[in-house]
Image (cartoon, rainbow, N blue to C red):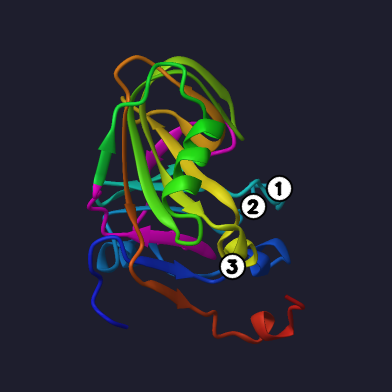
Amino acid sequence: MAPSIPNDIYQYSVRSAYNAGLKDGGPPVAFLTNHGTHGFGIFEAEEDDDGNEQPPRDMIQVDSVAYALDKDGDAERADKQDQMPFTMVTVFQPAQRVKPPSGTTHKRVLELFAGRAKNTPLSFRITGAFKYINTQQATYWDVKGTIFGFCVPSWQKDVSGEGLQSCFLSEDKKRGGRVLDFEMGEGAVLDYGKCGRFHLGFPQDEEYEQLRL
């Protein structure tokens, strides 16, 4: 593996493999710091005390610290041994900074990126106030915090997902979730950078080889 340089993206596994059922194993949280300061991912599924599988927790990495986001949107620092069957991380050093007007939406940010890098993945961070953030876990109104993730071009859909793939972490680092939609508030800042190189790590087990991707 080549040494990580700013805004390179390191990804483990492919999104189509995760969607096909490969939801166990993967690199642990401790592995992230070798490849990035910021990231997004999904932890392997866990079971409750009765043996029932629980919804997988999402991961957001901010300033080299990884947080786990559970099904209710509660956030906590992730254990260094927690594994992720899918993750994307980068050494985030944004090349561009803009302060979009209040009311800027998920759709508008996607349009901005399409005009700047239609075929190249981007890493991005939005910090500050939000009028609302709709996540897979919960909807938050008039909240402050950080969204971090990646804008993935359409050709890369089966590899990394498509569009804005990101998670939110509240300013107090107690709440968050996988972002579905948002509207930015007054003074929010958008930082982003184009990916120069993309590194993909493949699962090495037989289960991966048996999938129809």
Q: Is residue 76 above or below residue 47?
A: above
Measure how far apart labels 3 and 1 are at the Cα level. Answer: 34 Å
| Residue at image point 68% right, 81% down | 207
Q: Nearer the viewer, mark 2 or mark 1?
A: 2
Residue designated by label 2: 47
The residue under label 3 is which amino acid type?
Val
Residue neighbourhood size for the residue with mark 1, other residues' Cα within 10 Å, grouped as few (<14), some (14–19), many (≥20): few
* Magenta highlight on residue 42: no
**Callout 2–callout 1 Cβ contact below 8 Å:** yes
Residue designated by label 1: 50
Q: Secondary structure at mark 3?
A: helix
Measure how far apart labels 3 and 2 are at the Cα level. Answer: 27 Å
| Residue at image point 26% right, 44% down | 96
The disc placed on residue 32 is: none
The residue under label 1 is which amino acid type?
Asp
Lateral position of residue 161 relative to residue 200, left or right: right
Residue designated by label 3: 159
Q: Position of residue 126 (x, y in %)?
A: 35, 34
SS assignment for the magenta stretch, majority: loop
Q: Position of residue 97 (x, y in %)?
A: 26, 38
Q: Position of residue 13 (x, y in %)?
A: 54, 71
Q: Quadrant of residue 4?
A: bottom left
* Magenta highlight on residue 90: yes
Lateral position of residue 31 relative to residue 23, left or right: left
In the picture, which quadrant includes the N terminus?
A: bottom left
- Which residue is outermost to the front? 115
| Residue at image point 22% right, 52% down | 93
| Residue at image point 72% right, 49% down | 52
Measure how far apart labels 2 and 1 are at the Cα level. Answer: 8 Å
Residue bounds of the magenta highlight: 70-95
